[in-house]
Amino acid sequence: MAKKEELTKIEEAIKACKLCPLAKGRTYAVPGAGNFDADIVFIGEGPGAKEDKVGEPFVGAAGKFLAEMLAEIKMKREDVFITNVVKCRPPNNRDPLPDEVQTCTTNYLWKQLELIDPKIIITLGRHAMYRFLPQDRRISQDHGKLFKLTSPKSGRHFDIFPLYHPAAALYNGGMREVLMEDFKKIPRVLKKLELKQNPL
Ligand code: URA
């Protein structure tokens, strides 16, 4: 099956998913949005209230800030793929439970990542980062650094670049500046990875 068809099939499965209790509380599942051939996949923790109402990721204030930062590096939302660790909003924005994360990532997120095959995965916020990096990592020290991530599905290696969450940085001047500076590193980091993946 062609990549686009497979990714569309996964999106349909997410919209109809009843594999975990989060399905009961959702208005819409939020599979993700953007370019299936993107070099960059952004991963947040889970849909918030606004995202749940429309079925699209990062549509609130954090999403607007994300779009502003993308514009700084001459990119648009449509150029990247944006998704979340879990695809349904946890009640009252509580943290998703380990079982919910396990079910959702095994059935959906890893498949999306394998198919899109991005050059870099950018996690937004400490919760998304902790889903992929060892628990002793600290976002305050490890934001804006490159790490390796191995897919439990295929053993394929991904490069992962954790950043602060735009919602956390939005009203915190210091963090906002750090996030913007990290964001500006993205084109350089991508170039470096491209050269490593396809040496001259
Ligand atoms: N915060 C997230 O982590 N994900 C969204 O989709 C929106 C806000």
Image (tube, rainbow, N blue to C red):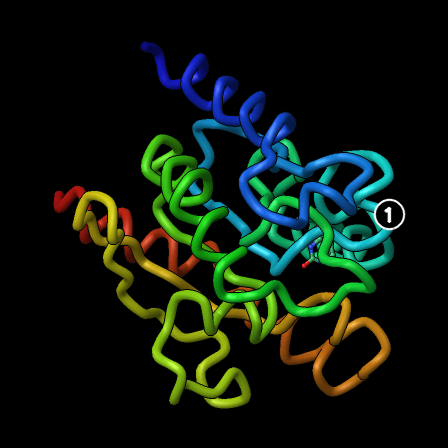
- 192, 61: nearer the viewer: 61
Type of the residue with mark 1 = Lys
- 144, 112: nearer the viewer: 112
Residue 166, image x, y percentages: 72, 66
191 is higher (above) or lower (below) than 8? below
Position of 155 with respect to 191 (left or right) is left
Q: Write the residue at 58% across / 45% down.
A: 83
- 176, 3: nearer the viewer: 3
Position of 57 with respect to 101 (left or right) is right
Q: Quadrant of ligand 1?
A: bottom right
Residue 79, image x, y percentages: 57, 34
Q: Write the residue at 54% across / 51% down.
A: 42
Circle 1 Cα neighbour tier, 10 Å, few/some/many (<14 / 14–19 / ≥20): some
Quarter of the picture containing the N terminus is top left
Indicate if the residue with disc 1 has its beta carbon within 8 Å of ligand 1: yes
Position of 166 with respect to 11 (left or right) is right
